[in-house]
Amino acid sequence: MDLVIVFGPAAVGKMTVGHALCELTGFKLFHNHATIEPVLGIFPFGSPPFGRLVSEFRRRVIEEAATSDLPGLVFTFVWALDNAEDRDTVASYVQIVEQAGGRARFVELYAEQDERLARNSTEFRLAQKASKRDLEGSRRNLLAMDVDYTLNTGGSRTKAEELIEQHDHVRIDNTNLTPGQVAQRVVEAFGLRNNLRH
């Protein structure tokens, strides 16, 4: 199985690109908020129970996918590249897939902040991510994360880059690209096949 990890800052288009990539390849989409939203209904964001449950759900889904007959899984994630815990978490997902005979690849998305702020309120995003419907709060969170974390490569070297460099990696500026255009670039960069069953 291919594990394609799509990372980048908030509202860069990870989920929409992931969706388009799955349409081209027959992979399944496992976006960040598929685990966040259900747990948020019970425990507050950032609380210890929230963190444990989200982490466990993600790990278990990846474990099951790795040993299934799925051709691939697209996982989207806001990755704080300068955070050792995030690096170890991603490394553990990669290890699960590789130990099952699969392969991990990284898709890094970058877009200008103004464009991401505009995308922060798109209909598809809000339909899939209930917690983002507080638009002012979501905007504040996006701006704060840009200040507090390193969310793209290309600046000071981070803890994550050694892991990224050990695998196929493509960095795409999608400020002016559609999700479909980005997905096509990913397919071409990695030589992914169409596994859709007709």
Image (tube, rainbow, N blue to C red):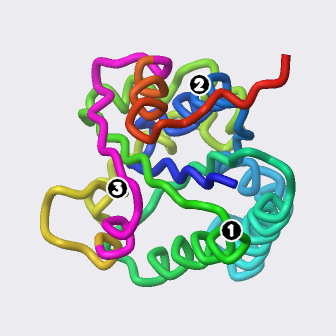
Q: Which mark is residue 2?
A: none
Specify whether 56 is left or right of 175. Answer: right
Q: Which mark is residue 20?
A: 2
Q: Earlier in the sequence, mark 3 or mark 2?
A: 2
Separation (CA) of disc 2 from disc 1: 25 Å
* Proximity of marks 2 and 1: CB atoms separated by less than 8 Å: no
Quadrant of the drawing holding the N terminus:
bottom right
| Residue toward you, 38 or 151 | 151
Give the quadrant of residue 39. Answer: bottom right
Q: Residue at x 24, y 58 (%)?
A: 153
- Please provide the residue range marked out in magenta: 162-180
The local crowd at label 1, few if under 14, some if 14 to 19, many if 20 or more residues have their Cα within 10 Å, is few
Please name the amino acid that badge 1 sits on: Gly
The local crowd at label 3, few if under 14, some if 14 to 19, many if 20 or more residues have their Cα within 10 Å, is few
Report the mark closest to the observer, 3 or 2.
Answer: 2
**Which residue has dot 3 on it?**
144
Q: Is residue 139 magenta?
A: no
Specify whether 83 is left or right of 74. Answer: left
Q: Residue at x 52, y 76 (%)?
A: 91
**Which residue has dot 1 on it?**
101
Please name the amino acid that badge 2 sits on: Ala
Judged from the image, the secondary structure of the residue bearing numbered disc 2 is helix
Q: Residue at x 38, y 73 (%)?
A: 163
**x and y percent of residue 34 in the render?**
75, 48
Please name the amino acid that badge 3 sits on: Ala
Q: Is residue 176 magenta?
A: yes
Q: Earlier in the sequence, mark 2 or mark 1?
A: 2
Give the quadrant of residue 15. Answer: top right
